[in-house]
Image (tube, rainbow, N blue to C red):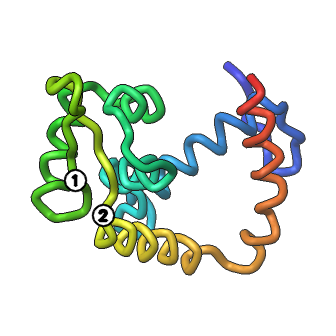
Amino acid sequence: MQEYRGENTIKSFAEQIVELKILADRWCEGKNKTNGLFLAKYQVLYVLSEGDFVAPKIIINKLGLAKSNLAIIAKELIKDGLIESKKDNQNRREIYYCITQKGRSELTKKLEQIEDQANNKQKKQIKTLEDAIKILEDF
């Protein structure tokens, strides 16, 4: 059985990434003091905010969602007026999604909520997180 390592122990990069993932999941899914800061619908809105019309395949790959789950989320987002769907003129079976102005507004509010939750000490650690993200993107 491995002995508990206190806070003063230097963790490996891999251990820090695991810790980061656990903490990010807890924060995003609302398993702390907040109530779900970044649920799947906001992740979809975020991906859509990065482009004009986005194919479901891109969203599925980027977020690791099942096709059926994306369909359920997209249906709800369309109903709420946060995204629109568009069929390809040449291949009517192809669908693309885009974020609406209402969707951009809701995403902006959610991102501001996340910013407001972070205290000054946490904001100073953003550089460290940015460095970790860069390393992970290069994998």
Disc on res. 84: 1
> Identity of the amino acid at label 2?
Thr
* Placement of the N terminus among the 4 image quadrants: top right
Q: Residue at x 83, y 53 (%)?
A: 128
Based on the displayed image, in which of its 4 quarters is residue 136 positioned? top right
Compared with 91, 128 (above or below) is below
Q: Secondary structure at mark 1?
A: strand
* Nearest to N terminus: mark 1 or mark 2: 1
Residue 54, position as x, y percentages in the image: 38, 40
Side of 23 where 34 appears, left or right: left
Which residue is disc 2 drawn over? 100
Based on the displayed image, in which of its 4 quarters is residue 32 positioned? bottom left
Furthest-front residue in this view: 90
Q: Residue at x 39, y 59 (%)?
A: 30
CB within 8 Å, label 1 to label 2? yes
Disc on res. 49: none
Of residues 7 and 84, the one nearer the viewer is 84
Side of 21 where 92 appears, left or right: left
Compared with 120, 9 (above or below) is above
Of residues 18 and 98, the one nearer the viewer is 98
Q: From mark 1 to mark 2, how far is it between C-alphas?
A: 7 Å
Residue 112, position as x, y percentages in the image: 51, 76
Mark 1 nearby-residue class (10 Å; few <14, some 14–19, many ≥20): some
Based on the displayed image, in which of its 4 quarters is residue 4 positioned? top right
Residue 48, position as x, y percentages in the image: 41, 49
> Identity of the amino acid at label 1?
Glu
Q: Residue at x 49, y 58 (%)?
A: 27
Residue 39, position as x, y percentages in the image: 35, 54
Q: Secondary structure at mark 2?
A: loop
